[in-house]
Amino acid sequence: MIVKKIIEKYLIDNSYDGLYCPYEPCGCYQNDLFPCTNYGNLDCVPGYKCTLDPVKWGEGQSGIGPKVDTNKGTVAPDMGTTE
């Protein structure tokens, strides 16, 4: 099994929508992993479909990002895992 398939299976099995990088404007959905062909980016973490932080990414941007606590409207501390 190639690395891309292992990651895809992990995302599906754990109900993630894709990967994102918390340090760059970069994210990909689980059905289109690594369109940037950056397989070596060890900063990618699992994430969810969301409206991205307007301060960091610009107003009205959506994509893959961290889990959001909808009760508080803030980013939850669980930023994903690098396992």
Image (cartoon, rainbow, N blue to C red):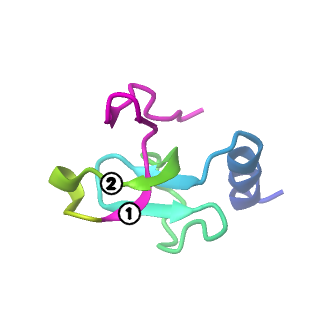
Q: In this orientation, which residue lies closer to the viewer: 12 or 33?
A: 12
Q: In this orientation, which residue lies closer to the viewer: 50 or 39?
A: 50
Kind of residue at badge 1: Ser
Residue at image location 47% in from the left, 46% down from the top: 42
State whether the magenta stretch is mostly helix, strand or loop.
Answer: loop
Give yes or no for contact between labels 2 and 1 (Cβ–Cβ under 8 Å): yes
- The answer to which image quadrant residue 61 occupies is bottom left
In the rendered view of the protein, which quadrant contains the N terminus? bottom right
Residue 15 vs 3, above or below: the answer is above
Identify the residue under disc 2.
52
The mark total stands at 2
Furthest residue in direction right, as rendered:
1
SS category of the residue bearing label 1: strand
Circle 1: is it few (<14), some (14-19), or many (20+) Cα within 10 Å? some
Residue at image location 68% in from the left, 48% down from the top: 11
Q: Is residue 79 magenta?
A: yes
Kind of residue at badge 2: Leu
29 displayed left or right of 68:
right
- The dot on residue 47 is none
Report how far apart the C-alphas of labels 2 and 1 lie in the structure.
5 Å
Q: In this orientation, which residue lies closer to the viewer: 31 or 1?
A: 31
Q: Give how far across and how far down residue 70 sits, in percent.
A: 41, 35
Furthest residue in direction front, as rendered:
71
Identify the residue under disc 1.
62
Q: Give how far across and how far down residue 29 sits, in percent.
A: 57, 63
Residue at image location 33% in from the left, 54% down from the top: 52
- The answer to which image quadrant residue 18 occupies is bottom right
Stretch in magenta: 61-83
Furthest residue in direction left, as rendered:
55
Residue 65 vs 68, above or below: the answer is below
29 displayed left or right of 7:
left
